[in-house]
Image: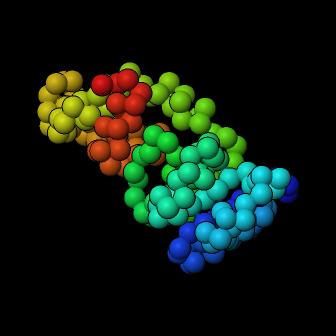
């Protein structure tokens, strides 16, 4: 991947330096920290493989990033799914961030699309009920299982999908036709 390169456009210098360090130390990839001046002097002859941008930079330069949305990753502070752009949450653990970056580098949308296939039928039922607003006790009663079993299924869903919040699970269920 030595010919692979990445541009990091964020107003948070510390995050940019940390992200560059991960790319260089973990993946051996050249990562360049740039400012918005980069966009004005952009040349398509040396277009990077991926852009990592913060929300402000994305919004102020939306016309630049929309045609490049497949290679643009939005840097966020929380898990906020986006229909248009891939996202990377800085509040995740280091290993989760590295795994997410690895997915971006390998073009890993296929992996996300196949995740529903790796869920058991019971996990899908639990996910459907979570998305419909049921609490653990109601899910346990409806499926005739213990609350501890519901908690186990929720833990498995979080591990398999990498989604920790109820709103994130609900959004995932809606996007994948579970509800």
Visual colour scheme: rainbow
* Rendered position, 48 above or below 23: above
For residue 146, what is the image quadrant? top left
What is the count of numbered marks? 0
Q: Is residue 119 above or below residue 68?
A: above
Q: Nearer the viewer, residue 92 or 86?
A: 86
Quadrant of the rendered structure where residue 8 is? bottom right
Rendering coords of residue 81 (x, y %): 42, 46
- The answer to whether residue 75 is seen in the rendering is no
User: Residue 125, image x and y in percent?
Assistant: 30, 25
Q: Furthest residue to the right? A: 3
Give the residue at x 70% y 43%.
106
Q: Tell me which residue sits at (52%, 64%) in the image.
A: 57
Q: Is residue 162 visible?
A: yes
Q: Residue at 47% of width from left, 64% of height from top?
A: 56
Dividing the picture into quarters, in which one does residue 16 lie? bottom right
- The residue depicted at 83 percent of the width and 53 percent of the height is 45
Q: Does 23 sit above or below residue 135?
A: below
**Quarter of the rendering occupied by the C terminus:** top left
Q: Is residue 39 left or right of residue 92?
A: right
| Whole-percent x, y for residue 25 in the image | 74, 67
Task: Tell me residue 150's x, y (percent).
Answer: 27, 36
Quick check: 97 above or below 25?
above
């Amino acid at each position: 991947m030595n010919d692979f390169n990445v541009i990091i456009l964020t107003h948070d210098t510390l995050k940019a330096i940390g992200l560059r360090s991960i790319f260089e130390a973990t993946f051996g990839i050249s990562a360049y920290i740039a400012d918005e001046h980069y966009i004005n002097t952009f040349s398509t002859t040396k277009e990077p493989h991926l852009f990592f941008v913060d929300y402000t930079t994305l919004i102020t330069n939306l016309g630049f990033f929309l045609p490049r949305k497949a290679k643009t990753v939005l840097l966020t502070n929380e898990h906020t799914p986006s229909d248009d752009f891939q996202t990377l949450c800085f509040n995740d653990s280091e290993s989760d961030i590295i795994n997410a970056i690895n997915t971006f580098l390998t073009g890993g949308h296929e992996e996300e699309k196949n995740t529903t296939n790796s869920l058991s039928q019971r996990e899908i039922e639990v996910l459907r009920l979570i998305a419909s607003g049921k609490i653990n006790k109601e899910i346990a009663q409806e499926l005739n299982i213990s609350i501890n079993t519901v908690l186990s299924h929720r833990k498995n869903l979080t591990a398999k999908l990498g989604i920790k919040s109820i709103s994130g699970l609900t959004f995932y269920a809606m996007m994948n036709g579970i509800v």
